[in-house]
Every structure is written in structure tokens, then in C-alpha cells.
Image: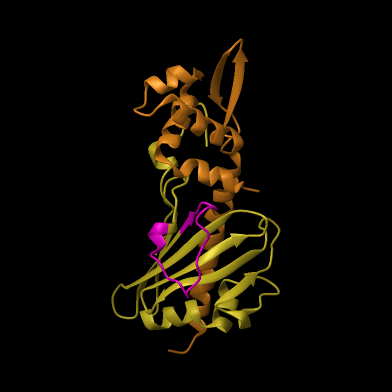
Chain colours: A orange, B yellow
Amino acid sequence: MTSPDLFRALADPTRRAVFERLVAGELSVSDLTAGFSVSQPAISQHLALLRDAGLVEERREGRRAFYRAKADGLAPLASWLDRYRTFWPDRVERLKDVLARMDQ
Amino acid sequence: MSMTDGPSRSAVEGELVTEAILDAAQAKVWRALTEPEIVADWLGSAGFEARAMPRFAIPPEADRPAIDCEILTADPPDRLSYAWREDAGQDSVVTFELSPAGPDRTRLRIGHRGVEPASRLRPLATPRPVSHMATRYAHAAPMRLAA
């Protein structure tokens, strides 16, 4: 089942960019902030939402926190897409059959 | 969706697209998309109750939860969109677009995209452009049906 949070998490362009950077490798909040023109608190907020959506995970080392993309974070989205990638072509074939039987 | 390669730009923006050329005039295709008994024949699954349109439900199938549908916009005979809510799952919007493709032939484009829960979908009574409700979400390359 797809979490509504997953779609919400990916809806924001900055958050999506943060996620994409973390897919490439683990980074600290300050490493991440250096790459964006937004404040560290804003980045932290994006990270919290990404974590709630199951897209990133946190690792603590003393007072420092490191983030990386979760390996299976996009799996619910992939299964949602798989479902409709076959659903719609199947329904279109049925629509063609129905049209062939209809009167003008 | 491989995490080692990372999602490509196209994988995190856009919608799932299905396209087809239908051997029927546009007005006839529009009827098939909007008349409850006809919709039941191609979109429904066992137990489909079309009488309740513009709000209706598609019963679950083996690999799919029940869907609660509600028509959001209807611009005959060109464009029709549904709110598409999975039972205990994801809200999305399905948009059907029709255009003529020659005598008695019609191009159909079905676009399906996720929406964020914060922007709860509004029914026909308070129409707004579908593009404002849609959020972007991951998808693979658009899939196209052969004509």
C-alpha cells in the first residue's frame, strides 16, 4: 500500500533534490545544506518529512547525524505504478471491444 | 526502480500515460466514457454499480484494492477527469483526453498521477484546473499502446 506521505514527500522540488543527493550517498545535514540555497533548519525539515515517508534513514555519530536514502524507499511507488501500468492497457482493450459493439 | 543508479529526472516527475487510437468517432467514445452502463462494461469489475455516477466504486481485484471514483471535470467531448482513491491507499487523478484522429477515429490519452493528501480533491461543484491539484511523483518512461 502506498503511503500518502510518499507522494507528498516527492511533491516538493527541493525535497526531491535532497532525496536524489542522498541516493548518491550518505551526507550530513551541513554537507547537504552546502549544496542548496536554503537554510539548515529548512533542510532539516525536509529530511524529517523524507524520513517519515520512509525515503531516508538517519545514522547518529555523537552529535552529528548522517542521512542516506533507504534502499526500498521507492518500492511502494514502484508497486503502485506496476499496478496501473497493466491496468490501463487492459481497460483500453475492453473499451475497444465495447465500442465495436455499440451503435453509432 | 534501482537505487544504485538513482532515480533519473524522468523517474520522479510526470504521470503514467496510456495512449491509443480508437476506431470510433469522438462523440461515441465520449458516450462510452460517461454513460454509466457502458462505463460498467469496460472500466468496472465484478459487482460494479454504475447507477451512482458521478460518484462510483470499482470493486477490488486480486492485485488491486477497491477504487472510489468521483468525476472532477467533464468538458464534453474533449476532457474528463476522475478523482481515483484507492481504499486505504493513495489518492490520484485520472484524466481522459479525446481528440479527432481522422474519420471515425479518435485519439485517447489517459494520464494518471498521484496527488498529495493536503490538497483534498474537490468534486464538480467547485471545479478547479486539474493541473493545480496534481503533484509530481515518480514514474517510469511513459507507456504507449500501439494503435
- Residue shown at 50% from the left, 53% from the top: B114
- Quadrant of the image occupied by residue B145: bottom left
Q: Nearer the viewer, residue A102 or B31?
A: B31
Q: Relative to B129, is B38 above or below?
A: below
Q: Nearer the viewer, residue B64 or B146?
A: B64
Q: From the top left corner, tell me how far across and down residue B50 is, in percent.
A: 61, 80
- Quadrant of the image occupied by residue A50: top right
Q: Please tell me whether the stretch drawn in magenta is mainly helix, strand or loop.
A: loop
Any magenta on residue B128? Answer: yes
Q: Along the horizontal axis of the image, is A67 left or right of A14?
A: right
- Quadrant of the image occupied by residue A65: top right
The mark tally for this picture is: 0
- Residue shown at 55% from the left, 18% from the top: A66
Any magenta on residue B129? Answer: yes
Q: From the top left corner, tell me how far across and down residue A89 is, in percent.
A: 51, 61
Specify start and end residues of the magenta stretch as a single range: B112-132
